[in-house]
Image: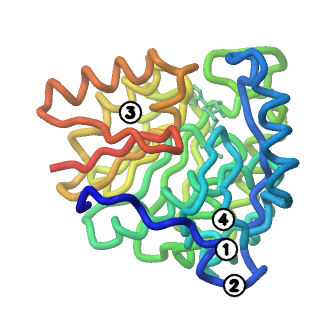
Amino acid sequence: MDGSSPPPPSTGRDAASSAGVRVAPLFYRLDLVPGAVPALQQLVAAVGDVADPRTPWYVGDNLITYGRSCGFLTDPRFVAAVEAAAPRDSERAMAWRTHTLCWAAENCRGVAGDFVECGTYEGYSMAVVLHFLGGLPERRCWLYDLFDPTPGPGVGKRLEAHAPDLYDRVCRRFARWPNVAVTRGKVPEVLAAGAPDRIAFLHVDLNNAAAELGALEALFDRVSAGGLIVFDDYGWTGYRAQKSAEDAFFTRRGLSVLELPTGQGLVVKR
Ligand SMILES: C[S@@+](CC[C@H](N)C(=O)[O-])C[C@H]1O[C@@H](n2cnc3c(N)ncnc32)[C@H](O)[C@@H]1O
């Protein structure tokens, strides 16, 4: 940065192609700011088709940017990985978050250890990552979730797809990759029954502070130097308890979490 004004945004993105990821302009927790809904509706109406990958806007997942390249949206490899995972609109809205994960996973390929996700739900994010990495045949990939089949609310539980067949559906989703193990159980307790000794990439997405801290206590020392840890909800105001617990955990170890505009948190293990 040289302190001068940034260049004016161009009217479109670099890749003048419509073959990109269409981002669904979805927002959550609009109740936090009175008047947010009409304001966002006005914005979306004024700028036209915000889902078009050629627009200079990124609108979705509580993130609005203007004049950013968003090169991932038209990167053929990322586009193919997203489309291969058959995204819902709510998943299309998370394209930037998913790009962060693909970037992190790609950059962990040179680091010793396996790939781990704590909190898999329907498996969308790791399905995109595995498509992006061509299945990651050289490593094992460990996916953990309660896959709670009981109806009703629960800690860190998303309700839409928590049904008796969720675990089987997720197993089927990953069956094409023999190096992927889908494990049903409560984190951190289930990790004692089977988890890798060395970890290169760790995605933590449990939506509750106690479980995320438990995952860190169990797994952090196994993450190799240069390995990356991505927290899905670190910067979301609805999950402040997670941020507080994780900040304290890393401060004790002389590290800190980078809060990303997507709401994710990123840690580089030293
Ligand atoms: C937001 S979802 C994960 C979404 C997934 N990572 C993705 O990006 O597609 C959070 C998941 O964490 C799981 N979960 C919450 N607490 C848990 C615990 N203590 N042990 C295992 N899974 C847990 C829930 O069952 C839920 O499926």
Pointer 2 local density, CA inside 10 Å: few below 14, some 14–19, many at least 20? few
Using the image, determine if residue 139 lies above or below residue 164.
below
Give the CA distance from mark 4 to mark 1.
5 Å
User: In which quadrant of the rendered view does residue 224 lie?
Assistant: bottom left
Q: Nearer the viewer, residue 234 or 169?
A: 234
Mark 3, other Cα within 10 Å: few <14 / some 14–19 / many ≥20 = few
Reading the image, the residue beneath label 1 is 12
Q: Position of residue 119 (x, y in %)?
A: 57, 38
Kind of residue at disc 2: Ala
> Pointer 3: what residue?
192
Is residue 194 visible in the rendered structure shown here?
A: no
Q: Nearer the viewer, mark 2 or mark 3?
A: 2
Instruction: Determine the CA span between mark 2 and mark 4.
Output: 11 Å
Which of the labelled discs sits on residue 16, or is there none? 2
Spatial distance from mark 3 to mark 4, Cα to Cα?
47 Å
In contact (CB < 8 Å): disc 3 and disc 1: no
Q: On residue 56, which mark appears?
A: 4
Q: Are marks 2 and 1 in contact (CB under 8 Å)?
A: yes
Q: Which mark is residue 37?
A: none
Q: At 74% from the left edge and 59% from the top edge, which residue is drawn?
A: 173
Q: Secondary structure at mark 1?
A: loop
